[in-house]
């Protein structure tokens, strides 16, 4: 018979220690929770420069003293699910702030909260309606023929569709965690969406409720998102900074506008069910979305551990595009970890700024003499990409860069980072 | 037996006596009412007059009924039917009891299978029979009452209300099934953790910190959920629950609309029609603006 050596005394001692710690923590936590907390999102100042129906455009004030300020403004288009405040979640984790410090003239679309009257708005209304009007507005304001466009998740898909239909207005395209290939069973969302009866859903709900979608997202990883997350909160609720950041994240996650019914229908039917976008078979407003018309430089980010939009849903875009200057960047994180984890704050936004600056300077060298007014009238559409061949990524040898390969999963991750990777 | 029948409290002679007494009493009561004199009529209102006439008719009806019942043939038939009453009640009770037992046996049979579905990390061929049985019982034994065709002027309102109750019941049973599936990984993960801890204890290697045990359990739970979510059974149940929820909401909205129409409130359907027209109109205006060359932007610069 094997003799067992169970350190009962040690276990009991640890349990007593834990109980004592928990008691102290609870007592301190009451001071923190009852005290004044700052959990505001999106604290970076901005002005609203454009409004149409429920849609608004935020313009942020960049650092005018930054070196190599970008001449071309950047428009960021967020998804219709959740809100763009994620890019400015907290003062020390703000993609917006990094862009401004890098001298980027930043505009961001705020899609607002769709109401019942928006249920008939299609993807075409969003892409060729609102987005086109906003882009024309920015072009006119800055006297430039083209602007830089960056899309996030579903907003990235919109940007891909827009750039394919209006390549003459987009100088550089950046897609982040953007689903374009839906023929994969790697993400649970892709599996579940295949059998959704969109007609019935729209008949029932009109717009698809944000809460319903949030419930679906929670179900993607209930162990982490419904249990571990709150256990982590209980363990750290005596830490004011932690509580503030946790509540910020919580506010962002559950701030989920409804999705207009017809937009949802088209996105699910055309993309999730029939995978038309990546095959260049999708139609918007009666016009084909041909990805070969994506001839502008294209930078494509995605997360290796993204459960919502897995790498397989993102990494086909560069191959399908008609651009000769493309780059895939795969970060070792989840769907929102790219934007909010402290680690990727140093790898994500600065990389975009650098990438844009390289292309901004090069293009300017070739186009300085063109009169802006002439450009606005569309006379420069046929200009060839000015990026030197040496800097191009060859399509054949295009293997996504996997950045951040330090052992994040073994090291002690912060809870916020864990949450962001779990989503 | 014949003697017993004769001694029954429902024998003919006692009924005759009772009927005669009752009949006489009510007729005497009737005679004590004021006579239909001219003076009485003159003071009676039209309603009172109608009441007196109706009472008189009723007395006459009662009288003729008692007379008919006093005849030996009728009384004997009544007595025998009353004697058969306990038997009828017993038959009715036994058939009802039989049906209830059948339902219960059906449920117990299915419920007996619950314990069989506890294999770790395996979610194929989940036995959700008990929930199907509940749905079955509801559909076969109870649902029919909600499907009785309503009659009369309000039949459509009743129909829609019953439809809402029906869809609600179906949604509840499907939701119960879905929640039970969601609970399965918890149940299984505890079992796996228990086995793991037992093994570690045998090796003298028990985690000394609760956090370690928690971390172990969480990983097991996450693994179970990932396996569950990939199973066809889960996806089917998820979609079935969503469909039943949608059915219920549609039926609820239809029924609610009936109530709202009684009030000066615009219904969602009215608004949807309006929104659609508004949306199409807006599109036409924008298209026309483009054709004419007017900027469609409603630019507002807020400082």
Image: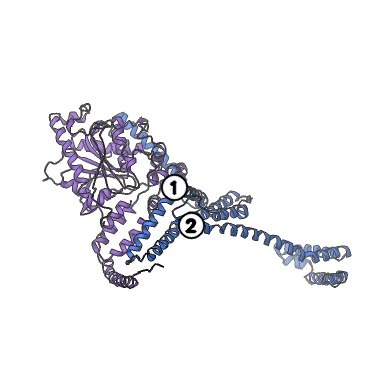
Whether B297 is drawn above or below B54: the answer is above
Whether B99 is drawn above or below B277: the answer is below
Horizontally, residue A276 falls left or right of residue A343, namely right
Tell me residue A6's x, y (percent).
Answer: 35, 69
Q: Is residue B296 visible in the rendered structure shown here? A: no
Q: Chain letter for blue, please.
A: B
A179 vs B26, nearest the viewer: A179
**The N terminus of chain A lies in which quarter of the figure?**
bottom left
Which chain is home to disc 2? B
Checking the image for residue B86, the label placed there is none
Q: Residues within 10 Å of mark 1 (few under 14, many from 20)?
A: some
Q: Chain letter for purple, please.
A: A
Look at the numbered disc 1 and give the secondary structure of its residue.
Answer: helix
A333 vs A133, nearest the viewer: A333
Q: Are marks 1 and 2 on the same chain?
A: no
Whether A340 is drawn above or below B215: the answer is above
Q: Is residue A181 visible in the rendered structure shown here? A: yes
Tell me residue B87's x, y (percent).
Answer: 77, 64
Which quadrant of the view contains residue B95? Answer: bottom right
Which quadrant of the view contains residue B2? Answer: bottom right
Look at the numbered disc 2 and give the secondary structure of its residue.
Answer: loop
Whether A379 is drawn above or below B47: the answer is above
Tell me residue B33's x, y (percent).
Answer: 77, 70
Tag count = 2
Q: Which mark lies nearer to you, 1 or 2?
A: 2
Residue at the spot of label 1: A205
Residue at the spot of label 2: B118
> Which colour style is shown?
by chain
How far, Cα to Cα, is label 1 from label 2? 37 Å
């Amino acid at each position: 018979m094997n003799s067992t050596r169970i350190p009962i005394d040690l276990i009991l001692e640890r349990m007593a220690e834990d109980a004592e710690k928990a008691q102290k923590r609870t007592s301190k936590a009451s001071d923190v929770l009852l005290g004044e907390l700052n959990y505001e999102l999106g604290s970076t100042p901005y002005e609203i420069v454009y409004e149409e129906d429920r849609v608004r455009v935020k313009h942020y004030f960049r650092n005018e003293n930054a070196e190599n300020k970008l001449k071309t403004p950047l428009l960021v288009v967020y998804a219709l699910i959740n809100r763009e405040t994620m890019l400015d979640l907290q003062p020390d984790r703000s993609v917006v702030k990094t862009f401004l410090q890098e001298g980027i003239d930043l505009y961001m679309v705020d899609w607002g909260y769709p109401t019942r009257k928006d249920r008939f708005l299609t993807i075409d209304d969003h892409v060729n309606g609102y987005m086109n009007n906003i882009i024309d507005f920015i072009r006119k304001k800055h006297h430039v023929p083209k602007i830089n466009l960056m899309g996030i998740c579903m907003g990235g898909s919109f940007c891909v569709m827009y750039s394919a239909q209006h390549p003459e207005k987009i100088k550089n395209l950046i897609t982040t965690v953007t689903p374009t290939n839906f023929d994969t069973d790697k993400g649970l969302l892709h599996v579940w969406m295949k059998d959704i009866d969109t007609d019935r859903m729209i008949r029932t709900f009109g717009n698809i409720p944000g809460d319903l979608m949030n419930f679906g997202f929670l179900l993607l990883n209930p162990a982490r998102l419904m249990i571990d997350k709150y256990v982590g909160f209980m363990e750290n609720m005596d830490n004011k900074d932690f509580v503030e950041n946790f509540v910020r994240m919580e506010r962002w996650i559950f701030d989920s506008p409804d999705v207009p019914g017809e937009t949802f229908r088209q996105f699910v039917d055309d993309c999730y069910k029939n995978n038309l976008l990546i095959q260049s078979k999708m139609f918007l407003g009666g016009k084909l979305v041909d990805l070969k018309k994506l001839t502008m430089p294209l930078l494509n980010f995605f997360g290796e551990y993204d459960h919502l939009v897995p790498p397989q849903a993102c990494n086909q875009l560069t191959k399908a595009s008609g651009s000769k200057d493309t780059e895939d960047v795969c970060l070792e994180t989840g769907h929102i970890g790219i934007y909010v984890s402290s680690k990727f704050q140093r790898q994500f936004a600065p990389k975009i700024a650098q990438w844009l600056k390289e292309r901004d300077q090069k293009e300017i060298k070739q186009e300085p003499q063109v009169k802006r007014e002439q450009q606005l009238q569309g006379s420069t559409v046929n200009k060839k990409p000015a990026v030197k061949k040496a800097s191009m990524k060859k399509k054949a040898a295009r293997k996504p860069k996997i950045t951040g390969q330090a052992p994040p999963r073994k090291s002690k991750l912060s809870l916020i980072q864990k949450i962001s990777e779990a989503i | 037996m014949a003697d017993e029948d004769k001694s029954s409290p429902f024998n003919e002679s006692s009924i005759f006596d009772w009927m005669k007494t009752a009949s006489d009493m009510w007729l005497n009561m009737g005679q004590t009412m004021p006579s239909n004199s001219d003076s009485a009529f003159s003071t009676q209102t039209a309603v009172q007059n109608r009441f007196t006439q109706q009472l008189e008719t009723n007395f006459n009806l009662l009288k003729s009924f008692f007379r008919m019942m006093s005849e030996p043939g009728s009384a004997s038939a009544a007595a025998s039917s009353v004697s058969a009453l306990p038997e009828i009640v017993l038959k009715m009770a036994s058939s009802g009891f039989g049906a209830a037992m059948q339902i219960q046996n059906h449920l117990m049979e299915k419920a007996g299978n619950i314990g069989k579905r506890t294999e770790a990390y395996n979610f194929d061929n989940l036995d959700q029979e008990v929930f199907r049985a509940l749905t079955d019982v509801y559909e076969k034994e109870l649902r029919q009452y909600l499907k009785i065709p309503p009659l009369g002027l309000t039949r459509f309102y009743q129909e829609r209300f019953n439809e809402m109750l029906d869809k609600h019941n179906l949604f509840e049973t499907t939701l119960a099934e879905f929640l039970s599936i969601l609970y399965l990984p918890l149940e299984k993960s505890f079992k796996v953790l228990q086995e793991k801890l037992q093994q570690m204890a045998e090796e003298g290697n028990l985690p000394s910190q609760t956090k370690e045990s928690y971390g172990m359990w969480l990983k097991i739970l996450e693994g179970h959920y990932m396996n569950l979510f990939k199973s066809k059974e889960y996806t089917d149940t998820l979609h079935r629950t969503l469909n039943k929820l949608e059915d219920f909401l549609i039926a609820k909205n239809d029924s609610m609309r009936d109530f709202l129409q009684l009030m000066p409130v615009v219904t969602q359907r009215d608004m949807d029609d309006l929104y659609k027209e508004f949306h199409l109109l807006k599109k036409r205006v924008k298209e026309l603006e483009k054709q004419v060359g007017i900027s469609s932007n409603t630019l507002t610069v807020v400082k």
